[in-house]
Amino acid sequence: MSLNQFRVVQPGEGITYDFPALAMTLVFLATSEDSDGEHSVFESIHQPGSGAPLHIHHRQDETAYVVEGQFLIRKGHEAVRRIGAGTYAHFPKGQAHAFKCVGDTPGKLLFWMRPGGYEKFFARAQQLLGSGPPDMEALAALGKEYDADIVGPMIEEDR
């Protein structure tokens, strides 16, 4: 599919990757195949306590928009920030960042990654993790194949 083609993705029509052991679900609305490699767009739905540890994408810029819920975010080793619905955050490639859903209700982020292709990491991660306990070492090794490195822990507190 080309960027100049009309595209509509209704609720329930995206490509879904469910990670029960990580308490999160991803729904891809656009993949690199849909955008001539330009970008990927996906919803990231999190139960409280789930998120991503401090990591770096060496190839992709990552932009997030909070649709619902409360999250903690961190850029590098700077202070943690609390963000909520309506907040926009952009993490340029090469910049360490982390996020975590907090509070008593699930949260939803809309992500745009440029260039596209990172959806392939999540497809392989779902096969790797299955429904068992997460093997974080295997996940970190897989991340390296997609030009991403885990460089720190999950956010543990709001400081």
Image: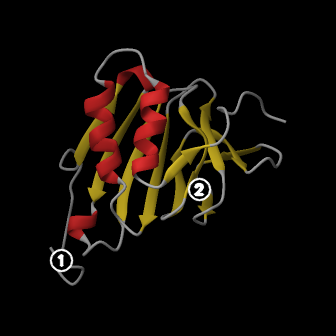
Residue 36 to residue 91: above or below:
below
- Characterize the local packing of mark 1: few (<14), some (14-19) or many (20 or more) Cα atoms within 10 angstroms: few
- Characterize the local packing of mark 2: few (<14), some (14-19) or many (20 or more) Cα atoms within 10 angstroms: few
Q: Residue at x 46, y 47 (%)?
A: 144
Image coords of residue 146 (percent x, y): 40, 53
* Cα–Cα gap, marks 2 and 1: 26 Å
Q: Which residue is mark 2?
A: 86
Residue 133 lies in quadrant = top left
Q: Amino acid at mark 1?
A: Phe
Image coords of residue 70 (percent x, y): 62, 39
Q: Residue at x 82, y 49 (%)?
A: 78
Residue farthest along the top direction in this orientation: 132
Residue 36 to residue 112: above or below:
below
Residue farthest along the bottom direction in this orientation: 4
Residue 142 lies in quadrant = top left
Q: Amino acid at mark 2?
A: Gly
Image coords of residue 86 (percent x, y): 59, 56
Q: Is residue 85 left or right of residue 126?
A: right
Image coords of residue 147 (percent x, y): 47, 55
Label for residue 6?
Answer: 1
Residue 74 to residue 18: above or below:
below
Q: Is residue 138 left or right of residue 156?
A: left
Where the C terminus falls, by quadrant?
top right
